[in-house]
Amino acid sequence: MDIKNTYRQLTSIDIEEQKQIWDERGKGYYGEYLLFCELYKSLLGCGKILMNLNIPVSDSNTTEIDLLLIHETGLYVFEIKHYKGTIYGDDTGAVWTQYFRTTKNNTFRNPIEQNKYHIEALRGMFSNTPIYSCIVFTNSECDIRVTNCNKEIDVCALRDIKRILGYRFSNTANIFSLEDIDKIFVKLTAYSQMQESVIIHGVEADFLSWVQPVIAGLENKKLEVEKEKQYWIEQKERAKASKDTGIVINVILAIVCAIITLVVTICIVQINNKKLAEFEQKFLHIDEIDNKYIDDLNSYVEISNVSLVPLTDDAVSFKARINMTNDTYGILITQEAKYIVMTTSGKVMEYDVFGKYLKYNKNSNTIGGTNRLYGDLAEIQFYGISDINDISYIKITEIELLKMGTSKTVIKDELEIELYCK
């Protein structure tokens, strides 16, 4: 059974179909799939996994848990997000922000609050059991900048999950035996999507026996090789009482079998790794925006004279100077330009660049009038911000990159310049 069929058995979801659709739900399934694989490759201690559990919260309503780990130290409820970009927020805020450099930002419900609802539903079934919340962002192109002061909650990227859980497990006492884990697992399978039984050699297999060998990869294969070698070593010991010819034959068989097993193991692992790499490659986004022009533009620009000054309890003023360091290129700040301001709490606000505070003369390629030097941005007031220390990032959008000359050819539009970063 390959890894995709294993995932389908557990969730009733055909990941191949989701690759064709690739909508928001399909991306979510892929994120769940990545965490599922990672846990089974690196899980410490004893535990079992269930996915897409519909736990009842009332007679008519249920709530869906992405992934639940039944571990010897307690229950771990995972809320999984396969988001890109930079994630800003805090553990008590109602919404978090998904920030992009080149596209419109997005806000979404605080996943900690979302997971809290799932945990409350579970507590109705396991009132005296420690239950931990874990928010995992599975996209490799995600940068997490979330303030979390709750020690009972973990917020991390997929690449950090082994370290995070390892620390949690090592500092938490074991409360479940293997029998306890099995009982909880059996109780909760009634709410899962795992409907089909799995038959191995004519016998219905338990969950761990058919999932673990498929996912664990090379580590388990190596164990199988060692068992095979141990078997033949034992055979060799038994053959000591036999004739010399019999001993030689058994030694040769042991070596041959060990070599064959090792070669087969390496081939299987290489094939599985190649398939997984191809599988992940097909899930890459196809709507990426080339950031080359933005990176080039910011390398041509020098920002100076940055000033952030508090005005009132609800406003701060900002000004800065833009200087082009490359004589070949120039810039135009278009009429659609905006200041984008992000706070340390993840709040994102937009402000118009033009208006009565800044005049723009496209023909002469100047910013402002005669009362200010070329490149000095007019002072602007950012309302809705009470503390300058709360501002973490400022950029200006809708910039055109020009190649200087008589025609001032526009090379690329809809660019942006970073003005301030805390």
Image (spheres, rainbow, N blue to C red):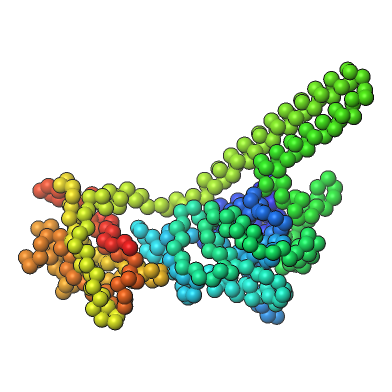
Q: Is residue 75 visible?
A: yes
Side (left or right) of 314 relative to 239: left
Judge whether 128 appears above or below 372 on screen: below
* Residue that appears at 80% across and 52% down: 205
Q: Residue at x 18, y 70 (%)?
A: 379
Residue 321 x %, y % = 18, 61
Q: Say whether residue 217 is left or right of residue 361.
A: right
User: In the picture, which quadrant includes the C terminus?
Assistant: bottom left
**Against 376, is 243 above or below?**
above
Q: Could you tell me which residue is drawn at 45 percent across and 50 percent down?
A: 286
Q: Nearer the viewer, residue 163 or 338?
A: 163
Query: Is residue 385 placed above or below 166 in the rendered structure?
Result: below
Residue occupying the far bottom of the picture: 313
Query: Residue 419: x percent and y percent?
Result: 26, 61
Task: Decide which of 277, 285 is in the foreground and name it.
Answer: 277
The answer to whether residue 63 of the structure is visible from this angle is no
